[in-house]
Amino acid sequence: MDLNPIVLSIPIFFILIGIELVVDRLTHKNLYQFPDAVANLSCGITSQLSGLFLKVVAVGIYQLVYEHAAIFVLEKNALYWISLVLLVDLAYYWAHRMSHEINLFWGGHVVHHQSEEYNLSVALRQSSLQVVWTFAFNLPLALIGFDTLDFVLISSLNTLYQFWIHTETIQKLPKWIEFIFNTPSHHRVHHGRNPQYIDKNHAGALIIWDRMFGTFEEEKERPVYGITKPLQSWNPVFANVSHYADMASDIKRIPNWKDKFIYLFKKPGWLPAYLGGQRTVPEVQPDTYQKYTTPAPVNLNLYVLFQFVVALIGTALFLFNEKNFELIDKAWIALLITFTVVNCGVLFENKKWAVYAEWLRIVLYPVLLVSCVYLFQLHIVLYGVAFAFFLISSLWFYSITKK
């Protein structure tokens, strides 16, 4: 399989996000905040970039187990595919549930829950590190004898299913659908930070697992979205490391090594009894809760939109052609794209260093592109692209930053 179905679905994602935006404007629900949407998509970009390196390892380990330890040789019939669909979803349920119940794993999943909005862009807000903690939950499928490519296909389709449930534009569906399948209503509960909604509805495609294992919760009151300690940043790199920074602070407070180790595998918020024990989930009032906002002038919004669209196009082209690059080239391109999306986020935060970082990027990227054209004899039109990018970006950004 040359391309991940998730990568192939990128155009469909953006078409559906566009439709939701139109519905949002017509209904005046204000489901989107521009910096938040940029941050969500930025986390999606960094997740796809890290996946080029980490997911290869995870799939590689699955393949090793399948080749050398599979117990059965399975015939690929209807029962095979039905069983694989069900078992992939069951493995996802337990990996997802443990990502909420184990502190170390939560650090790899918390990114997906940091947005205080709930729309289709949140579906693309994914962690760069989660696969490190969750891939092992799929290895029993390799032991049973499910082919690696078949597993990757069904796992990708399971992930794709979950895209559409990240919306407030769809209310409750017919009862039989709500009973069997994960739906927008069920998943809104999962993203709620209300105490009664914490650690509920971990399903991927089938809500039956939550009903069976006691983690189901019906949507009753409208959820307040986000995490109990708001991130308050649009920086996708910080989003991926923030929980581990908090864990490091907690570990420093714990005096003995046994409790330090136990802390890693306890529920998020746990501390030893002598430091206060499990921290309670704070109550939240939907009518008074203040979301993180960073008002910005229209010119800055448009500038970030321009840079972000360029980054999206570049990322899509890279992902569709990544097999043509050497490992070191992939790493450099991933770093350059990450630099761009980080800047797009922190420019909204009015950080002084972000201005210097953006000027560096405006100068550096055209120089790098011109150098590549010269060294690798690429199409001469790229000289014009480099010049146009520098001219547009420098004049535009100067108009924003001049006093």
Image (cartoon, rainbow, N blue to C red):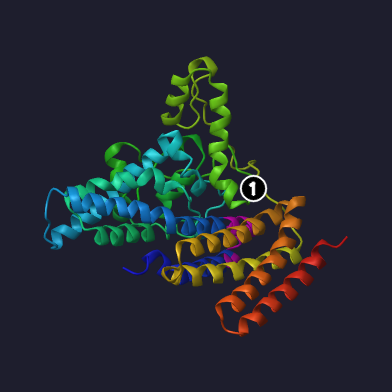
Q: Residue at x 58, y 29 (%)?
A: 249
Check the picture and name the quadrant holding the N terminus. Answer: bottom left
Tell which of 164 and 354 is nearer to you. Answer: 354
- Badge 1: residue crowd in 10 Å (few <14, some 14–19, many ≥20): many
Tell which of 286 and 371 is nearer to you. Answer: 371
Check the picture and name the quadrant holding the C terminus. Answer: bottom right
Taking the magenta stretch, the answer to whether it contains residue 28 is yes
The quarter of the picture where residue 397 lies is bottom right
Q: Which residues are drawn in magenta?
A: 25-39
Res. 238 visible in picture: yes
Provide residue 153's location: percent of width, then percent of height. Answer: 30, 62
The quarter of the picture where residue 382 lies is bottom right
Tell whether 284 sits left or right of 267.
Answer: right
Q: Residue at x 41, y 40 (%)?
A: 99
Taking the magenta stretch, the answer to whether it contains residue 34 is yes
Provide residue 26's location: percent of width, then percent of height. Answer: 58, 67
Q: Which residue in the protein does label 1 denote?
A: 233
Task: From the image, give the main secondary structure of the stretch colored magenta.
Answer: helix
Q: Is residue 289 above or below residue 373?
A: above
Provide residue 398's location: percent of width, then percent of height. Answer: 81, 66
Q: Residue at x 76, y 61 (%)?
A: 297
Q: Amino acid at mark 1?
A: Ser
Question: Which residue sits furthest bottom?
Answer: 380
Question: Which residue sits furthest right?
Answer: 403
Q: Is residue 267 above or below residue 375?
A: above
Tell which of 276 and 338 is nearer to you. Answer: 338
Tell whether 302 sits left or right of 10.
Answer: right
Question: Which residue sits furthest top?
Answer: 274
Question: Which residue sits furthest front?
Answer: 375
Label 1, secondary structure: give it: loop
Provide residue 327's location: percent of width, then percent of height. Answer: 45, 61
